[in-house]
Amino acid sequence: MSACTSGAKDYIERTYETKLPKGLEVLWHHVNDNLGGYEHEEWFLVRIPDGSLAENEAFHCSCMGYEGQWHPRPTSLVYLLSDHFGAAGMNAEDKAEFRAWLSGQTWGKGES
């Protein structure tokens, strides 16, 4: 689980077989590979070009990849910091790391 690097957008476009909009920023990527062998889940937090936040969660197994699973849905800081938030098998330690990062960010207007 980590804040994203510059290669994240290329990874998404290649792995999900999609074209990302210009100006999309990948903020966080979490992989849950504790599903046993050939199954994985991924979760991304992104800032879309209008400045709002969105999240994308996808599942991959040995017979099917992530293709066609890039459909970010709107989210908010309120939700991400709430007890209701949970994504891609995040355990308590993962959530604590993510929330510490999230709380340390400077957020602009419209990202609440």
Image: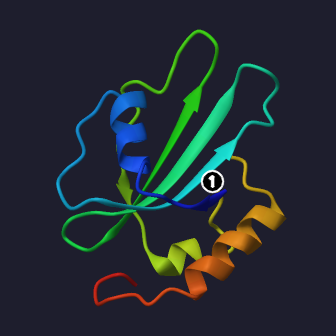
Which residue is tagged 1?
87
Q: Is residue 31 above or below residue 83?
A: above
Q: Position of residue 10 (x, y in %)?
A: 36, 41
Does residue 82 appear anywhere in the picture?
A: no
Q: Position of residue 29 (x, y in %)?
A: 55, 54
Q: Residue at x 19, y 70 (%)?
A: 50
Q: Residue at x 40, y 87 (%)?
A: 107
Q: Residue at x 41, y 56 (%)?
A: 6
Q: Residue furthest front?
A: 6
79 or 38, nearer to the observer: 38
Q: Can you tell which quarter of the image residue 98 is in?
A: bottom right
Q: Residue at x 65, y 77 (%)?
A: 99
**Helix, strand or loop under label 1:** loop
Q: Position of residue 39 (x, y in %)?
A: 70, 25
52 or 17, nearer to the observer: 17
Does residue 42 appear anywhere in the picture?
A: yes
Q: Position of residue 47 (x, y in %)?
A: 34, 66
Q: Can you tell which quarter of the image residue 83 is in?
A: bottom right
Q: Amino acid at mark 1?
A: Ala
Q: How many marks?
A: 1
Q: Is residue 31 above or below residue 5?
A: above
Quarter of the figure that contains the N terminus: bottom right
